Amino acid sequence: MTEQQDPLSAFITRPRPNVEAGIRLFCLPYAGGGALIYRNWPDLLPAGVEVCPIRLPGRENRIGTAPFRRIGDLTEALIGDLIPFLDRPYAVFGHSMGALLGFELVRALRRREAPLPRRLLVSGCWAPQVAFPHDPLHNLPRNEFIARLREYGGTPEAVLDHAELMDLFVPVLRADFELVETYTHIPEKPLECPISAFGGEWDEKVSQEDLANWAEQTESHFKLTLFPGDHFFLHGREAALTKEITRALLG
């Protein structure tokens, strides 16, 4: 399946457009990730769910576009493209950096009095009211930065060992980590929509308590589900994760 960008949007891809879908699922990537993270999801979710991965600047066919370094700037750029696609029920999923971005995106939509999602789905990310729990990476010297990426996981070894590829990816990864590491939570009223949180049982970066703290960000139902795996459990547990998302959206 070939990913295509919607002609109306710089950000939104619709690998399998479905005008009859009952709900759209907008999927946001982790640091350094792109829309292709979710390439299998249209086959794993019911036909009534239209999967719409978000393609951020600096990656895939937007490799020549400068990535954002502040979450508020990215949210404002994305929201204009997103609003035309809120003509039916929708949900937002994000993993790690994508979870923080999804949360701030929904709050920005609420401030604009736009339709709110049926559910916010957050994965592999500490709750936004919790300060960034790790030492910053984004401003490390190149060799140290790459060494920390190797420890962090998520970036294939073949990419980490390829100097020319890393010349392309390091600026994007630095920008993404800066976006997360400079994030400051501004308290607002909890969201009216339910929140589902997902995590890996062996994730050394995001604990079960970190995930449980997301309950403070909703006035509605909250559910936490753990899967076997580490921080990037979603790659090995796609079938189980999408099955749980289906229950959350359509159950």
Image (spheres, rainbow, N blue to C red):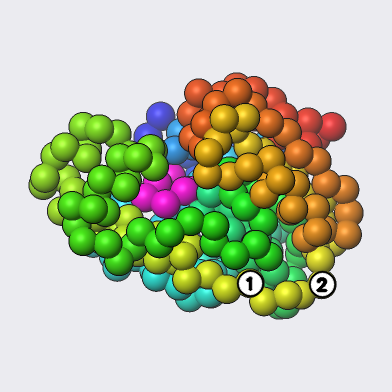
Q: Amino acid at mark 2?
A: Lys
Quadrant of the image occupied by residue 178: bottom left
Left or right: 75 as drawn, with respect to 31: right
Are dots 2 and 1 in contact, CB under 8 Å?
no
**Is residue 220 left or right of 234 when viewed as pictured?**
right
Residue 34, given in percent of the width and then of the height, sits at 40, 47
Which quadrant of the figure contains the N terminus? top left
Q: Nearer the viewer, residue 251 or 72?
A: 72
* Residue 84 in which image quadrant: bottom right
Query: Is residue 30 a member of the stretch shown in magenta?
Result: yes
Which residues are the magenta region?
28-35
Above or below, 64 relative to 49: below
Q: Which residue is mark 1?
A: 185
Instruction: Please tell me in which quadrant of the rendered image residue 115 appears.
Output: bottom right
* Residue that carries the numbered disc 2 in the rendered image: 189
For the point 54% across and 61% down, the residue is: 132
Q: Is residue 157 magenta?
A: no
Visible residue check, residue 89: no
**For the point 53% across and 70% down, which residue is it?**
183
Figure quadrant of the C terminus: top right
Helix or strand or loop: what does disc 1 sit on? Answer: loop
Q: Secondary structure at mark 2?
A: loop
> x, y (%) of residue 133?
54, 57
Residue 190 visible in rendering = yes
